[in-house]
Amino acid sequence: MAAVDLNTHPGHLARRLQQAHTLLWSTLVSEETTSPQFAVLNALAEKPDIDQRTLGEEVRLDRSTVADVVARLARRGLVERVRDPLDGRRNVLRATAEGARVHRRLVARTEAMNRVFLAPLDEHERETLLRLIGRVAEAAEKIRDQR
C-alpha cells in the first residue's frame, strides 16, 4: 500500500498547528501559564463567581481537564474557591488579585502572539481560518456531547 499525503489529513495538520501554537505560546506568552489556564483566567475575568461546571462549558474543557487546570491555578494563588453566597451548598470560582494581574499581563502577550501566529495570512484569510476552525470544533463538540 502506498503512503498517503498527510497534508490532506486534517488531524495531522491540526497537530502541526497545535505544535506551532505551543511553541509560540511558550516563547511569546508564558512558560508558567498554559493556554487552557489563560482561558480559565479569561473566563473568570468576564464572568467571576461561576461554578466549575459552567466554567468548563465556557472554555470548552471537559470536567477532568477543567478540574486539573483550576487546581493548578489555585495552587499558584491565581484562583480561589469561595462559598456561593446564593447557595451555600456550592462553591464558585474567582480570580485572585494576582490572577487578575497575570491575566492582564497575558492579554497583551496573547494579542502579540496571535499576530505572529497568523502573520502568513491576510486579514480575509485570518477571518476565514478562524471561522472554519470554529465550525469544525463546534461540530466535533456536538458529536462528543451526543455520546
Image (cartoon, rainbow, N blue to C red):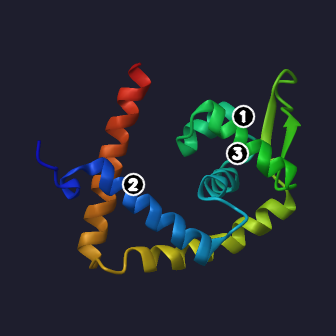
- Disc ID at residue 112: none
The residue indicated by pointer 1 is 51
Q: Circle 2 — which element?
A: helix
Instruction: Identify the residue position indicated by label 3 in the image.
Output: 69
Q: Is residue 105 above or below residue 96?
A: below
Q: Residue furthest left?
A: 2
Query: Which of 88 and 53 lies nearest the eye of the viewer?
Result: 53
Name the outermost residue toward the front: 1
Q: Quadrant of residue 116?
A: bottom left
Residue 122 coordinates in the image, percent (x, y): 26, 79
Other residues around mark 3 within 10 Å, as few (<14) / some (14–19) / many (≥20)? many
The kind of residue on which mark 1 rests is Asp
Q: Quadrant of the N terminus?
A: top left
Secondary element at tag 3: helix
Q: Tell me the residue at 70%/70% (across/down).
A: 104
**Residue at image location 69% in from the left, 51% down from the top:** 44
From the top left corner, tell me how far across and down residue 43 is, in percent: 63, 51
Which of the pair 88/122 is nearer the observer?
122
Q: Which x, y percent locates residue 144? A: 41, 28
As measured in the structure, the alpha-carbon distance from the residue carrying label 3 to the one carrying label 2 is 21 Å
Q: Quadrant of the C terminus?
A: top left
Mark 2: few/some/many CA within 10 Å (<14, 14-19, 20+): few
Label disc, if present, on residue 15 of the rendered structure: 2
Work out whether residue 66 or residue 43 is closer to the camera in this orientation and state it. Answer: 66
Q: Quadrant of residue 89?
A: top right
Query: Quick one: SS at disc 1?
Result: loop
